[in-house]
Image: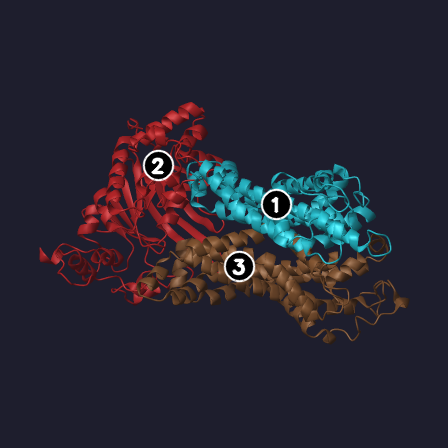
Amino acid sequence: MGKYVVRRLLMMIPTFLGATLIIFYLSFALPGDPTAGRCGERPCPASYVEWFRSHYGLDKPFLVQYGIYMGRLLTGDLGTNYYGNTVIHELAIRYPTTLKLAVIAIVAEILIGIGAGILAGIRRGRFIDSLVTISTLVVIAIPVFVLGSLAQMVFGIKLKWFPVTAGDGTWGQLLLPGLVLGSLYVAYVARLTRTNLVENLRADYVRTAYAKGMQPARAIGLHALRNSLLPSITYIGASFGALLGGAIVTERIFNINGVGSLIYRSISQRDGTTLVGAVVVIVVIYMVMTLLVDLLYGLLDPRLRHE
Amino acid sequence: MTTISENQPPFEHLLDVRDLHVEFRMRAGVAKAINGVSFHLDERETLAILGESGSGKSVTAQAIMGILDSPPGYITGGQVLFQGADMLKMKPKARAAMRGPKISMIFQDALSALNPVFPVGWQIAEMFRIHRDMNRTDAMAQAIRLMERVRIPGAKERYKAYPHQFSGGMRQRIMIAMAIALDPWILIADEPTTALDVTVQAQIMDLLKELQEEFGMGLILITHDLGVVANVADRIAVMYAGRLMETAPVGALYANPRHPYTIGLLESVPRLDSKLGETLPAIGGLPPNLLRMPAGCPFNPRCRFAIDKCREGVPPDLTDLADSVPRRAACWRVEDPAVTAEARIAVGGDQS
Amino acid sequence: MSEIVTTTAAERPRSLGADAWDVMRRRPLFWVAAVLVVLFVAMAIAPELFTTKDPRSCDLAFSRQLPSAGAIFGYDFQGCDIFARTVYGARASILVGIFTALAAALLGGLLGTLAGYLGGAVDAVLSRIADIFFSIPLLLGAIVVGSVVPLSPNSPLWRCVIQIVLVLVLFGWPNTFRLMRGSVMQVKPNEYVQAARALGANPFRVTTSHIVPNALTPLIVVSTIDLGSYIATEATLSFLGVGLPGTIVSWGRDISAASGIGYIRNAPHMLLFPAAALCLTVLAFIILGEVVRDALDPKLR
């Protein structure tokens, strides 16, 4: 087990370097001049531009800039943006909000997604199965930005069940946006759970459980379900990174001041330092989650136990 | 169970299957998998159900156990009497309670039949915990005792091991331990050795035979392997296309097969006296499609004795034959001298 | 059960494809999806068959008018005919969806086959590269690239489509790569492949005629389903302003323009129709993929 973790951590190094290199390259290739607009109406004087470029290291070759950045990153320093704020600070004030969104989405995946999947799976071919199969299909087909706008229209404006926007980032305000953010993954989890359950209900070992005199509740609830939930758990873990990425859309629709909005704003303001910092943190979280999920899978499925 | 009850039991047979019908309702149509199967099993007796794959022998076993996949499988008629009580009329809960203490089953592929995510010892102990309400420690001790009984080396240490960590033979031993845990009256073994190496096959069959005597179980052995049957079974029931073709004590059947299908089966077994390089006769053709059964006797398209009568009407279900031992067959021409003569040639009887 | 299936198959041997078609054409869902796909593809090829109006000739006098006999979907903020815009919007979405799915299937399929078949160093290197692109969420990566290389309003449609396709493939190929690598590794140890190798078939032949055809099914199914989600992603990018420029008629742009809170309140039809067209298209491809998978997977029958 320990050996496996070390090997996986080592494998993450090239992935991390490659991913950060790409993001770093893209962010610093952002078009436009970061000094534009910093000196009032007129373009900045040449001396200021020169100072600005050398202060932020923009005059150095790309790979040198990347090296310096990575060096700082290892000490936990994500740099200071052109507005004089440290990126760590910018992220720290916004991550709680975005994490709340992601937590709401994950909880929905577990409760609604797995719940609906189990219901549909054990009532295969009945009404509830068709309902789950069709409604998840519809949810998958509606892009999040459409679903968000529709949810805002129906639940926020027409029915007034939820606040229309979520400026303060309280749990109550974030509930609807969180459900919208998670909707796609809730639907996938439900379908995945159903498919695996249906398959496992026909597995030989479930037949054995019946042959051993187990009542259906135990044969299904313990023997079939334990195996059926493994892929769903992996999927839910892996969806975490995608949720953080998807927050860009949701936060924009509901006007939430989170990491997604920060990324969006840093793009429009040509603020490469903030952009790199925000995206790198998402990538790291994503990679760590993937590793944790794999380790968890190994714990839950003895066939894959890493010894 | 080691002592037989002294009073005369109020039933004729330990297990009595009467006119069982099973069908599978699928998108492509209704497949009549079992069409009026009747047989019985007595205490301490071994009955072998012999047939090709698709003949319905596994379905029969699952119907008796009450673990048929439904949908698509449905029992559409008949009775399954265990000690005189019809199990098909029981409530599901009562039926489930019988599986384990009264009647239990082992399967062909122990790897897929054991749950991959639970330790083997736990899976054996589950029998005691569910049926006997035993606590964890006692159930564990019982499971280890059983693992030792089926000769799993290092039983105590391997209690916590998972199915994939065992060899095929060891896995089948674990299945057997689980099935005999509650000292059942009947054990159904569905192709218990088919997935195993030849050397291991013999060990498993020996173990089954040994346990059957020790526990005094009735054994239903489902197989397609004539070799396995000969050494173990008391009686044989030959199955084809969801019907029984012939039932007879094992010696009588081998010495003197009466149904043309049985004759064909025995002919296809290599014998010590067959000449080198001689091709073995095989039954031509394939078993019928259960969705579109031929008119008349289901075996008639492959039967070399088939006459018009065989193509027109289904032969009556198993009828008693004139013989020194109790035996039955379902064939229009079974008492026909032409067929009887062929049968003798088939088993080499012409040379004696 | 399986025993019965075997006997059925034995009596009338048929190809898997013919069998799958037989199952598929009996499912109403398949026909719903097929009709929708044909409809939207036809819109993409020849929008003028569906409407005589020009989606770009607008009259502010009609701004935000509700649906009526003259304009069955009503008018948008600019006074453009929403029906015409919805019909013409199909082209960009369908082009992006089809070409991204194709390119991702080709690239991921090819590299996945190489990695799965050759193994060793080739597999290690390709897998690490795939990991890198996989670790950046598709939408996030596409948004960043979209803002680094913004599409100018003067760019012709084909230029925009090519760029968006390239961006989506860049971050989307690891999915098809992993899928194909997995199925090739599953097929490779099969006896018929070993037999072909033992008989001296060269690696290229073994791969093309024995491994790929048997490993292709999951790739086809997933690519069809992904086609729908690529269309959704393109619309999301356009919605966020980092996809198609506003000069090109597209569902994403129209939904974006219609989703301001004031508009949602007063003129929901502006949002509803392009959104419905988008969702139906995505739905059609997802259903198609699923029906094909169900038909090819005898386990679920």
Find chain B in the image and tell me its colour.
red
Task: Confirm or deny contact between disc 2 and disc 1 (CB under 8 A).
Answer: no
Disc 2 versus disc 3: distance between alpha carbons?
37 Å
Mark 3 neighbour class, 10 Å CA radius: few under 14, some 14 to 19, many 20 or more: many
Q: For mark 2, give the secondary structure.
A: helix
Residue B92 location, x and y as percent? Answer: 48, 38
Q: Chain of mark 1?
A: A
Image mark for residue B174: 2
Q: Chain of mark 2?
A: B
Inter-mark Cα distance, 2 to 1: 56 Å
Badge 3 marks a residue whose secondary structure is helix
Chain letter of the residue beneath label 3 in the structure image: C
Does residue A58 sit above or below B158 in this rendering?
below
* Three-letter code, disc 2: Ile
CA separation in Å, label 1 and label 3: 45 Å
Q: Is residue B188 visible?
A: yes
Residue that label 3 marks: C293
Q: Which residue is mark 1?
A: A70
Q: Are marks 2 and 3 on the same chain?
A: no
Name which quarter of the figure residue C287 lies in: bottom right
Which amino acid lies under the numbered mark 3 shown in the image of this protein? Arg
Residue farthest toward the right in the current orientation of the protein? C61
Q: Is residue C287 visible?
A: no
